[in-house]
Amino acid sequence: MLCVRNTQLETLHAGLTPVTRTGDYSDVFVLDGNGRRIPWTEVSHIDEDEMRALMQEIVNRLYTFHLEADDPKLQTTIEGWMGVAMKWDEPEIDPRMISRGQESRRD
């Protein structure tokens, strides 16, 4: 939560969510500045600069969290968010990360 949730991801999440009557957004389109009518499912919702900035912020937070987890100031921050974090689902191991790691080692 500290490393991912309260980042630029919140800015990307903000704003209006389009209404879809089909449930799969195939009925939603974006009209761009050049007059192109682009299906919602084909629209990029984040540009390269936003993606780079988001990933750098998350990596920096994860790095800081892992290296400074014992720091009393960080512990105070963590404890302050525990009430909210306790309401989230328990994390699970992502087996795709493990299997991808094994595949790359075989190459």
Image (cartoon, rainbow, N blue to C red):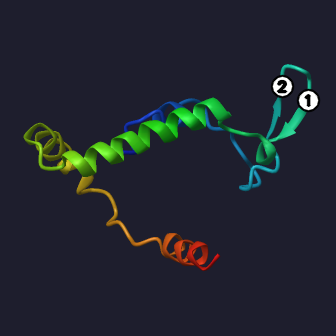
* Kind of residue sitting beneath label 2: Asp
Label 2: which residue? Answer: 32
Q: Is residue 75 visible?
A: yes
Tags 2 and 1 in contact by the CB under 8 Å rule?
yes
Q: Residue at x 11, y 37 (%)?
A: 73
Label 2 packing within 10 angstroms: few (<14), some (14-19), many (20+) = few
Q: Classify mark 1: residues with Cα within 10 Å, few (<14), some (14-19) or many (20+).
A: few
Q: Is residue 53 above or below residue 102?
A: above
Q: CA distance from mark 2 to mark 1?
A: 5 Å
Name the residue nearer the viewer: 47 or 24.
47
Q: Which residue is mark 1?
A: 36
Q: Does residue 84 appear left or right of residue 104 in this picture?
A: left
Q: Is residue 23 left or right of residue 66?
A: right
Give whichever of 100, 1 is nearer the camera: 100
Residue 5: % across, % down = 39, 43
Vertical position of residue 64 compared to residue 47: above or below: below
* SS class, disc 1: loop
